[in-house]
Structure formats: structure tokens, C-alpha cells
Amino acid sequence: MPRPRTFKTDKVHVGDCIDLMNAWPEDRVDLVFADPPYNIGFHYDEYDDNRPGDEYVQWTEDWINGCVRLLKPTGSLYVLIGDEYAAETRMHLKRLEQEQKLVFRNWIVWHYTFGQNCKSKFNRSHAHLFYCVGSAATGKWKASDPPFAFNRQDIAVPSARQTTYADRRANPKGKLPDDTWYLRPQEVADDGEVSYFGPDEDTWYLSRLCGTFKERQGWHPCQLPEALLERIVKLSSHEGDVVFDPFTGSGTTLAVAARLGRHWAGTELSADYAKRATQRIKHVQKTGQTHTTTLSDKGIERGKPKKKAEPHRSTKDQVGPAVFK
Ligand SMILES: C[S@@+](CC[C@H](N)C(=O)[O-])C[C@H]1O[C@@H](n2cnc3c(N)ncnc32)[C@H](O)[C@@H]1O
């Protein structure tokens, strides 16, 4: 039998996530966050996001199996997915639960604004986030002492009992957020900056990252907001744990993990994305700060069209994902 390859952390591994995950020893990571391509025709530099449905579903099952293999029994797994393949993905997670390989905890809906404008249907403004934990949770356990990281105090928010009703029964430490997370445009300031998680909010206020936002790196088509990852990393891992992202992209998960004192590791098909993501993560490690950009970095002048379109908006070779028509 071939010897398993060494799993190195604090590194973005270039290559196919399934091949790499299956070559590494099992039970290595404490938290997996996966944001795969959604098979909706986005324009990545290496990956073709337009595959026959059956092939995409089989591929989804294969990479999820790889993640579960790599996850410690005490770990947590989050999968972010669009409408198109949410049902198939959920069904596979259910099968894995039946095989006692993980336990499904929440179907979270991330409700965002600044969704893509559609011409002949309602604009999409949500994505699905499946939250599961490892096989250690298949047995009996107490809610006060779960067999997986659940740092409730790190993400608790003030409850309405505290902020609105001054109810003496309110837990002074606040409450856990709900399973729908959303952002309204009024939370976005004039300069395009977003205020996340104000002191009296018990809902997840989160936008997609618009091109003008300082956090947007400008070279990857689907960068997630750091705030989304911050809550997940804080809740489901401890300092010194290993956080893994099979679809590193612009490096959001791993940059947040590094900023919060976790070890990080990822895989990425594109050598170019991996290189730039690593630069972003190293910046965070060196400075402790999120890597931000200016409008001019991205070729944007206020009130004028962008000089250079972001990769997926380049319409020379495609009209844009059909899903947004
Ligand atoms: C939706 S993006 C991830 C974006 C990321 N969450 C972020 O915030 O930047 C998906 C990424 O997966 C990469 N990818 C696609 N297939 C892959 C594979 N088989 N192995 C590793 N990476 C892959 C793509 O190149 C793309 O960068």
C-alpha cells in the first residue's frame, strides 16, 4: 500500500482537492469550510463551471467524502452551496449521517443583498450553508459539553429580552444567533463599507462582497466576506486548531483562520489563485490585519464604469451565468 503523503499545514496546496485529500492520512483537521464552484457557469481560470449535472453531483459526493475522511471525529464541516445542487448535497450529507460518519446540525440560510440582478425572475439573495459535526457526535452527549468545538460565548449576541424588554430572565451573556443570516442595504455606509454585527443585532447581517468594498481583492470571481468565516471559525475551532478549505479561491477562510490564531491549510486547482491567496494570508499573519484594497487598485473611478472588469463579468466569451437571467 502506498505511504500516505504528509499533510502540511500553513500552506495552500496546488492541485485537485479530491486527489490531495485522499492521499493524506485521515483525521487531520478540526474544521472544514467548503465553498465549491456551483456549476452555474462562473468564469474561473482553471476550472470549468459548466459540467453535466450527473457528473457534478458525483464530483460533489467525492469531494465531500474526502473532507469527511480528513476531518477529525471531533471536527466540524460547513458546506456553502447554491439552490441548483442544494438538494443533492443535502441528500449526500444525510446518507453520510446514516452511515454514522457525521451528524447534521443546521441548514443555515445566508440572506445577502447586492445579489445579481435578474431580468425575468426574482433576484437571488441567499445561499445554503450546511453545518455538520464529526462522528464523535453520533453517540450520547450533553448539550453543555458537546464532543466538538462550540464556542458559544465567542459568537453570542444580545437577545431581545436584553435590548428591548429589559427582561430580568435574560441571559446576561446573550443568546446564540438564529439560523438565517442577512444584511439590509441600510447597513452599508456611503463609502461602501459594511458594519457587521452591531451590538444590538441578533441576526447575521452580511452582504456579498461588492466590487467597491475595501475587502474585495478584485482578482477572484467569488470572494466571500471575512465576517461570514469569522463567526464559523470562532464558533467551531479553538486557537491552535487546524482549519481546512478544499476550495481556497481568494483565501478568505484561511486568512480569517490565520488572523484568529488557527493553523490553516487549503487546496486550490489554480496555481495563480493559490499564490495570490497565500500572499493575502501571509499579509494577515504579518500585520494581524485584513488585506484591503483601494478603488484605484481595482481600476474603479467613482461614478464611472470600471476600467477593467472582474474576471467573471468579462463578457467577451460568455454572457454571464445563465442562472442570473
Ligand atoms: C467558489 S470559489 C471559492 C471562493 C472562496 N471561498 C473565497 O472566498 O475566495 C471555488 C474555488 O475552487 C477552485 N477549484 C475548483 N475545482 C477544484 C478542485 N478540484 N480542487 C481544488 N480547487 C478547486 C476554483 O479554482 C475556485 O477558486
Image (cartoon, rainbow, N blue to C red):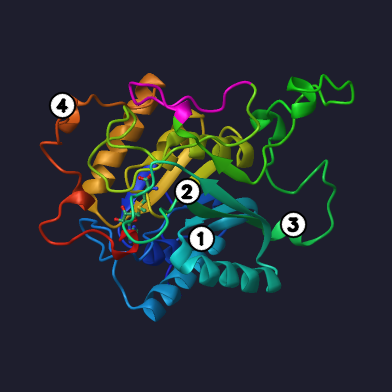
Is 176 included in the stretch rendered in magenta? no
Tell me the distance, in whole angstroms, between the alpha carbons under discs 2 and 1.
Answer: 9 Å
Q: Is residue 1 left or right of residue 30?
A: left
| Camera-nearest residue between 40 and 78 | 40
Q: Quadrant of the C terminus?
A: bottom left
Q: Are marks 3 and 2 in contact (CB under 8 Å)?
A: no
Note whether ligand 1 is within 8 Å of mark 4.
no
Callout 3 environment at 10 Å: few (<14), some (14 to 19), or many (20+)? many
Tell me the distance, in whole angstroms, between the alpha carbons under discs 4 and 2.
Answer: 37 Å
Q: Are marks 4 and 2 in contact (CB under 8 Å)?
A: no
SS label for mark 1: helix
SS label for mark 2: strand
Note whether ligand 1 is within 8 Å of mark 2.
no
Residue at the farthest front position: 120
Residue 244, label in figure: 2
The residue that label 3 is drawn on is 137
Q: Are marks 2 and 1 in contact (CB under 8 Å)?
A: yes
Residue type at mark 2 is Phe
| Camera-nearest residue between 224 and 241 | 224
Query: Which region shows up in magenta?
Result: 186-199
The residue that label 1 is drawn on is 67
Tell me the distance, in whole angstroms, between the alpha carbons under discs 3 and 1.
Answer: 17 Å
N-term-proximal mark, 4 vs 1: 1
Residue type at mark 3 is Ala
